Image: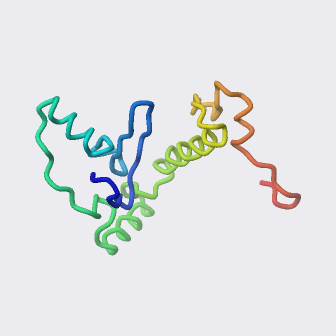
Amino acid sequence: MAENQEFEEEGMMFVGDKGKILGGFHSEDPQLLPAARMRAYRTANHLPEPAPRRRGGGGRGGNPAARNAAWIAAFKGGPASYGDFLLAGPICDAMTLASISLRLGGRRLLWDSAAARITNIPEANRLLTRDYRPGWEL
């Protein structure tokens, strides 16, 4: 991916101590950023350059009628749609934890998904919930 090039509509970016990796919505087709690092990696590992990527589509866009048919089929007991809560839950957890990490200055969080708790910074758990105004409690 060239510098200053537009990203796909959906995707995931992983930022680590040694660089960044950009992939599709399901982390497919991972690419090191900047593009020069990806080229160097391919050269060092004797990997061919991939075919040019199609913009859009990616299995999630496409025909609105087909998308709606898949959504309706899921309601009728068919295969899960992309909007399935079982898929969305972990994504929401990741986004929430990223937000909490940013509020804590980028600190690394260890997450116990079974207990739905942050284990290494106990005071961070207060950021998992909110205090509701009277009359708006859950």
Numbered label tally: 0
- Across and down, in percent, residue 130 comes to 76, 48
Quick one: 133 or 32, which is closer to the camera?
A: 32
The image position of residue 73, as x and y in percent, is 38, 64
As drawn, which residue projects farthest toward the bottom?
Answer: 65
Residue at 15% from the left image edge and 47% from the top image edge: 50
**Above-or-below relation of 122 to 91:** above
Q: Residue furthest top?
A: 120
Name the residue rendered at 38%, 52% in the picture: 11
Asked if 83 appears above or below 86 in the picture, the reply is: below
- Judging from the image, the colouring scheme is rainbow
Horizontal side, residue 6 vs residue 101: left or right:
left
For the C terminus, the quadrant is: bottom right
Which x, y percent locates residue 123? 74, 31
Residue placed farthest to the right in the image?
134
Residue 39 falls in image quadrant: top left
The image quadrant that residue 52 belongs to is bottom left
Q: Which residue is drawn at 41% across and 60% down?
A: 74
Question: In the image, 66: left or right of 84?
Answer: left
Residue at point 21%, 56% (across, down): 53
* Residue situated in front as seen by the camera: 98 or 84: 98
Is 39 or 60 nearer to us in this picture?
39
Instruction: Name the quadrant containing residue 47.
Output: top left
The spot of residue 33 in percent (x, y) is: 33, 43
